[in-house]
Image (cartoon, rainbow, N blue to C red):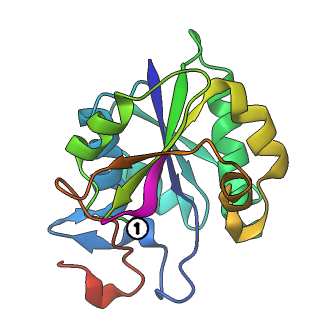
Amino acid sequence: MTAGLLLAAGEGRRFGMPKALAAHRGHALVTRAADALLEGGCDPVVVVLGARADEARPLVPAGARAVVAGDWAEGMGASLRTGLRALADADPPPVAALVHLVDLPDVGADVVARMCGYAGTDVVARAAYAGIPGHPVLFGRRWWAEIATQAAGDRGARDWLRARDDVQLVDCGDIGGGRDADTPELLDP
């Protein structure tokens, strides 16, 4: 069983609003991203909220569980820690967690399903687009405590990943894109 972990807590300072609340093709980004995890086969799916969580919570689809990172303002590392803690308490415990970011509108259920095919307790794998590492990232349960300890600021698990030589790249360029929606102009309302 592979859990889905959606990081959607940021306030989107440069974006002008929390990206979780932004619309793309008629749906909030948080809804689209959580649906991709659910439809791609993740179970359970945990959505980490923070900024304007009361507005984002109703947008989390049925089948996904919303949790709030009280320390969300510290950055992505805080959200990642909150999400991994929530998954560690799952019964039965998932084999791996597929970590997805809310601002990646081109990552669909097909990318999620492909990544889930690599799940294992020891795995470290990340989607790649045109050979460039991106998201989502798959972390075997074995690594969760170590990642949570090192996750900091807006870097999340980036430093932890860079220090490893066993990260498996999974080519997803044929079915998705790793484009970040860093400005509202990159979305189709």
Query: Along the line of sight, which residue is nearer the eye, 69 or 157?
Result: 157
Q: Residue at x 73, y 46 (%)?
A: 81
Q: Is residue 136 magenta?
A: yes
Give the residue pinned by disc 1: 103
Question: Does residue 86 show up?
Answer: yes
Q: Residue at x 49, y 73 (%)?
A: 18
Dot 1 amino acid type: Asp
Q: Residue at x 63, y 41 (%)?
A: 83
- Image location (x, y in percent) of residue 71: 77, 59
Q: Residue at x 56, y 30 (%)?
A: 123
Q: Is residue 162 magenta?
A: no
Q: How many marks?
A: 1
- Image location (x, y in percent) of residue 29: 33, 63
Q: Main secondary structure of the magenta part?
A: strand
Query: Along the line of sight, which residue is nearer the eye, 122 or 146?
Result: 122
Quarter of the image with the C terminus is: bottom left
**Span shown in magenta:** 130-137
- Image location (x, y in percent) of residue 25: 15, 69
Above or below, 123 relative to 72: above
Query: Along the line of sight, which residue is nearer the eye, 54 or 11?
Result: 11
Quarter of the image with the N terminus is: top left
